Amino acid sequence: VANSFATAFGANCLTIHQACVIAAVCELGGSVLLGGSVSDTIRKGMMDIKLYAGDEGRVIIMAGMTSVLLAAATWLLVASKYGLPVSTTHSAVGGVVAIAVASKGYDSVKWDKVGMIVLSWFVSPALASFVGFCSYAVIKKMVMQHEDSFRRAKIASPILVFILMF
């Protein structure tokens, strides 16, 4: 949430209350609309869930996922206190991999799935940089450098908001 709203709050475009309300709505919407596939990946996509059949397996998963939550929360608090960059996702993925390795060995981890998750951590910023660069270049050329930039901005704004929202 801080990554999304720090710039708007820092520039005094939003108050802390406004940023928290908008963030709450966006976080709730994202978790309701997209959270199922993310939780499925965390829950059973990174490790061979068949190895955890039966009562003993359920106890391992329950205790392990509780440990992931506690470890991730602890790490996020400590890192935040010292001003270190944090990622809840990185912490959770690392915790789930640790559970699988500690309880059933290295072969219980679906390394191809973990590899895709780690790859997305590098591809996403690169792709976002490319799209941001292209968007800025188009807006700069088509709106900002035109002699009637105010009129063009009024025309372009609803179109850009539509594109960004959908």
Image: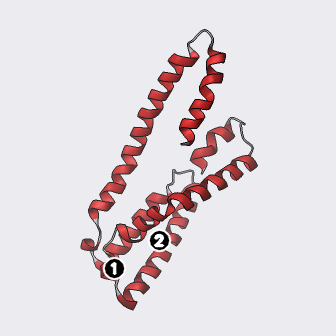
Q: What's the residue at 41%, 44% (across, down)? A: 124
As displayed, is residue 150 above or below residue 156?
A: above
Q: How many labels does the image show?
A: 2
Q: Is mark 1 on a helix, strand or loop?
A: helix
Residue 105, horizontal then vertical, whole percent: 27, 76
What residue is rendered at 68% in x and 49% in y? 22
Identify residue type, mark 1: Ser
* Element assignment for label 2: helix
**Circle 1 residues within 10 Å: few <14, some 14–19, many ≥20:** some
**Number of residues whose C-alpha sits closer than 10 Å to that of mark 2, classed few (under 14), some (14–19) or many (20 or more):** many
Whether 134 is drawn above or below 78: the answer is above
Colour logic = secondary structure
- Residue 13 percent location from the top left of the image: 71, 36
Q: Check the image and name the residue furthest to the bottom.
A: 55
The numbered mark, 1 or 2, whose residue comes first in the sequence reads 2
Which residue is at a point 44% across and 27% down the rendered structure image? 134
Front residue of 79/125: it is 125
Question: Is residue 110 shown above or below 165?
Answer: below
Q: Name the residue under label 1.
A: 103
**Residue highlighted by disc 2:** 68
Q: In which quarter of the image is residue 90?
A: bottom left
Q: Where is residue 40 in the image (x, y as percent from the top left)?
A: 42, 67
The single residue placed furthest to the left in the displayed view is 107
Instruction: Give the image location of residue 143, x and y in percent.
Output: 57, 18
- Residue type highlighted by circle 2: Val
Q: Is residue 125 rendered to the left or right of residue 6? A: left
On screen, residue 15 versus residue 157, left or right, reads right
